[in-house]
Image (cartoon, helix red, strand yellow):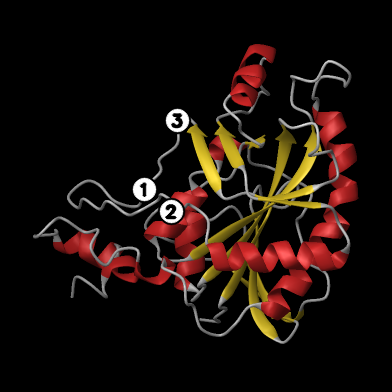
């Protein structure tokens, strides 16, 4: 099986990565089903990168339908250690304008119907999640965005909503009153699952609109988002390319040891052990 240390999950509008060479296409089965699409593995800036279009090529899957567990597990099987996630987002702050990028450092979970863990059914794991994004990978993305010349905001809370419909005006004003920076539909459960898989995860959030709170701007619609998104995608590709070139060989964050003291079940059924071996075999032989 081909391997890659870096994974890129492309959001709305980002279905491929130009500039990749030595390309292979891999279709995988996991204990959690098939990923959103075949995974493209190739060389980018001298490094092996696995690219997965989150919604499938042609945008076939809604945010609530995404096979997030299969997506993250499949990347784990390929040897991925770091995930750059591209997410479209609405802004709650006047200064965070459509076309800007945000590298968030916190999440507020407002999803309601998504399975957000690999574990359960016989194994209990309490992974730390106080800081949901890898600070090292986030810093690399922030610096790359600055160097590309795109306006970028470092930090801020990302409200992860269920979707697929957009916020009501009341919801938008509520989240804004909480001090949140942006809102989107796809950063969870990916970030939680990446933590359980001991993978670094950071979001490059592409701002497309002002959600529904801003009196002077039109209410968010799919057409409005897509129009701004197309302008953001070229920038996102340039940022990813530069960020990939800056990622160091070794990981010096806490992500690689997230499960060290998190597995509390003493006797795990053998089938679960086999299914979850890529995640827990370091701790449960």
Q: Which secondary structure, mark 1?
A: loop
Between the C-alphas of marks 2 and 1, the distance is 6 Å
Please say whether residue 33 is visible from this viewpoint.
Answer: no
The answer to the question of whether label 1 and label 3 lie on touching residues, with beta carbons closer than 8 A, is no
Q: Report x, y in % for residue 34.
A: 50, 55
Q: Report x, y in % for residue 125.
A: 25, 53
Q: Earlier in the sequence, mark 2 or mark 1?
A: 1
Quarter of the image for residue 99 reads top right
User: Which residue position holds label 2?
Assistant: 193
Q: Report x, y in % for residue 75.
A: 51, 66
User: Which residue position holds label 3?
Assistant: 113
At 64% across and 65% down in the image, what residue appears? Answer: 139
Q: Is residue 174 placed above or below 248 in the rendered structure?
A: above
Q: Which secondary structure, mark 2?
A: helix
Between the C-alphas of marks 1 and 3, the distance is 12 Å
At 79% across and 62% down in the image, what residue appears? Answer: 145
Number of numbered discs visible in the structure rendering: 3
**95 or 223, nearer to the observer:** 95
Q: Is residue 58 left or right of residue 47?
A: right
Q: Is residue 178 placed above or below 25 in the rendered structure?
A: above
Query: Crowding near pointer 2: few (<14 within 10 Å), some, many (20+)?
Result: many
**63 or 208, nearer to the observer:** 208
Q: Is residue 98 placed above or below 236 in the rendered structure?
A: above
**270 or 206, nearer to the observer:** 206
Q: Earlier in the sequence, mark 2 or mark 3?
A: 3
User: Which of the numbered marks, if any, corresponds to residue 117?
Assistant: 1
At 40% across and 63% down in the image, what residue appears? Answer: 197
The C terminus sits in image quarter: bottom left
Q: Report x, y in % for residue 234.
A: 87, 58
Query: Crowding near pointer 3: few (<14 within 10 Å), some, many (20+)?
Result: few
């Amino acid at each position: 099986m081909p391997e890659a240390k870096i994974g890129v999950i492309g959001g709305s509008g980002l279905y491929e990565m130009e500039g990749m060479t030595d390309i292979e296409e891999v279709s995988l089965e996991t204990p959690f089903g098939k990923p959103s699409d075949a995974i493209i593995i190739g060389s980018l800036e001298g490094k092996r990168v696995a690219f997965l279009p989150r919604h499938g090529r042609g945008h076939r899957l809604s945010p609530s339908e995404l096979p997030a567990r299969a997506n993250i597990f499949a990347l784990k099987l390929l040897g991925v250690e770091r995930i750059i996630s591209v997410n479209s987002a609405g802004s709650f702050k006047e200064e965070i304008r459509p076309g800007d990028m945000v590298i968030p450092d916190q999440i507020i979970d407002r999803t309601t119907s998504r399975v957000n863990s690999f574990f359960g059914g016989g194994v209990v794991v309490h992974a730390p999640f106080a800081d949901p994004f890898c600070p090292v990978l986030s810093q690399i993305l922030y610096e790359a965005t600055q160097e590309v010349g795109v306006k970028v905001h470092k930090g801020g809370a990302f409200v992860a909503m269920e979707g697929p419909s957009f916020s009501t005006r009341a919801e938008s004003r509520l989240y804004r009153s909480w001090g949140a920076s942006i809102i989107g539909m796809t950063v969870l459960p990916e970030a939680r699952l990446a933590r359980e898989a001991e993978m670094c995860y950071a979001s490059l959030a592409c701002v497309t609109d002002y959600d529904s709170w801003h009196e002077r701007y039109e209410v968010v619609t799919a057409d409005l988002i897509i129009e701004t998104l197309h302008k953001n995608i070229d920038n996102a590709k340039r940022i990813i390319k530069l960020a990939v070139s800056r990622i160091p060989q070794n990981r010096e964050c806490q992500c690689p040891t997230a499960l060290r003291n998190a597995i509390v079940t003493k006797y795990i059924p053998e089938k679960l052990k086999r299914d979850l071996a890529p995640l827990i075999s370091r701790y449960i032989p």
